[in-house]
């Protein structure tokens, strides 16, 4: 680098260093803070939605558990004494197989009912669909569980 | 500013969103000027600087406090400006990396030309450069960053930064000479 080049480089550096900073428009800061606040609000809404979905899932699980408890208790009442008898385990398993076949036979009917129900729902908001699905699930469990006791007695 | 900036960053990282306003106050002119000199459009520059601040706020939890804050913030602004340039259909890749034709031994610069480098003229000369050169020059001389920090901002190796600084200066000299020939 010769002296002339050095001098010019320094002149360029000094000229760039002395460039003034420009200011954005008056609403710039407010715009940034508003965007940040909007983002924070959106994150809060998302957190609320996730909590609501979690609460709905938990209540759904509780409802399913409640609806299933009756058939489960009846199931245990039917099969436990039989399974406890000598040689009763094999018999209980055969009965279970027969009952499973009966339930499988009812499944298409249950799915058809759900499909019909779903066909009525598209116009409703998702929360009603979820609520209806919860009720439908409980109804299916009851429908499958309750008559099975009678089938088993035959 | 160092302590204040650290304090503001600490408050922001602790979840105090209002403290970010202090960082906006401290950097808005610098980021806006940087964006304006790259984009050459006040509205686009304001949009890019605003987007950079919002992105910085979102990315703050990932900011490494052991690193200086300014290059990190300028890196985000650089990305916002590159996005704006691309959106405007401008080439911002290495298309300008080839050094323009310059004589091997440049003739000595007239002292009066070097002395005549006032703000208006250097502003016009920077605006005439491809962004990769004007950006490197602005970060080096206006923002007082070293090649390592500039490399972090521009996302290129330090050697590339040094080459861009050299080429940027040479381009300015060449344009000064060309302007001097017509004066």
Image (cartoon, coloured by chain):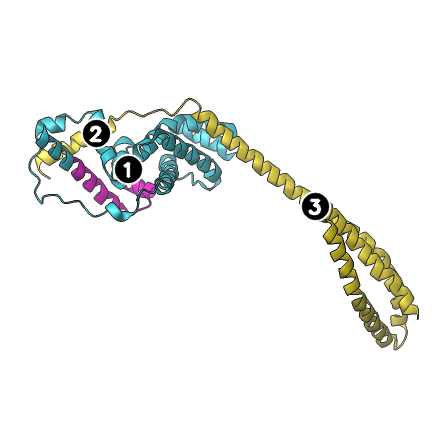
Chain colours: A yellow, B cyan
**Which subunit holds the residue at mark 3?**
A
Label 3 SS: loop
Residue located beneath label 1 in the image: B135
Residue located beneath label 2 in the image: B122
Residue A45: x and y in percent read 61, 37
Q: Which mark is residue A37?
A: none
Residue A1 vs residue B138, the one in the foreground: B138
Residue A95: x and y in percent read 85, 73
Comparing marks 3 and 2, which lies closer to the viewer?
A: 3
**From this viewpoint, which residue is outermost toward the right?**
A154
Q: Are marks 1 and 3 on the same chain?
A: no
Circle 1 packing at 10 Å, graded few (<14), some (14-19), many (20+), is: many
When the figure is inspected, residue B164 is found, relative to residue B18, above or below; the finding is: below
Region in magenta: B146-172
Label 1 SS: helix
> Disc 2 versus disc 1: distance between alpha carbons?
13 Å
Q: Which mark is residue A123?
A: 3
Label 2 SS: helix
**Which subunit holds the residue at mark 1?**
B
Q: Are marks 3 and 2 on the same chain?
A: no
Please state if A42 lies on the left or on the right of B178 as rendered: right
The image quadrant of residue B78 is top left
> Disc 1 versus disc 3: distance between alpha carbons?
55 Å
């Amino acid at each position: 680098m010769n002296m002339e080049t050095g001098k010019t480089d320094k002149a360029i550096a000094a000229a760039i260093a002395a460039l003034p900073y420009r200011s954005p428009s008056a609403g710039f800061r407010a715009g940034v803070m508003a965007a940040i606040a909007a983002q924070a609000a959106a994150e809060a809404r998302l957190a609320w939605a996730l909590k609501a979905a979690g609460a709905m899932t938990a209540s759904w699980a509780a409802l399913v558990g409640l609806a299933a408890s009756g058939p489960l208790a009846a199931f245990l009442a039917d099969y436990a004494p039989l399974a406890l008898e000598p040689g009763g385990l094999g018999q209980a398993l055969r009965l279970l197989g027969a009952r499973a076949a009966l339930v499988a036979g009812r499944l298409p009917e249950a799915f058809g009912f759900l499909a019909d129900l779903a066909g009525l729902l598209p116009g409703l908001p998702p929360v009603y669909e979820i609520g209806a699905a919860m009720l439908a699930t409980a109804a299916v469990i009851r429908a499958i569980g309750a008559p099975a006791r009678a089938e088993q007695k035959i | 500013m160092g302590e204040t900036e650290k304090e503001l960053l600490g408050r922001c990282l602790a979840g105090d969103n209002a403290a970010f306003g202090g960082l906006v106050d401290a950097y808005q002119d610098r980021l806006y000027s940087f964006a304006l000199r790259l984009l050459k459009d006040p509205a686009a520059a304001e949009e890019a600087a605003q987007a950079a601040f919002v992105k910085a706020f979102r990315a703050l939890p990932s900011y490494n406090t052991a690193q200086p804050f300014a290059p990190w913030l300028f890196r985000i602004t650089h990305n916002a400006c590159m996005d704006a340039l691309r959106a405007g259909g401008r080439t911002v890749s290495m298309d300008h990396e080839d050094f323009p034709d310059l004589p091997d031994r440049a003739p000595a610069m007239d002292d009066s030309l070097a002395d005549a480098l006032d703000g208006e003229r250097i502003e016009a000369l920077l605006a005439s450069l491809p962004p990769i050169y004007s950006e490197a020059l602005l970060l080096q001389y206006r923002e007082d960053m070293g090649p390592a920090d500039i490399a972090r901002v521009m996302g290129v190796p330090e050697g590339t930064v040094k080459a861009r600084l050299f080429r940027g200066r040479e381009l300015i000299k060449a344009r000064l000479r060309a302007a001097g020939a017509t004066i």
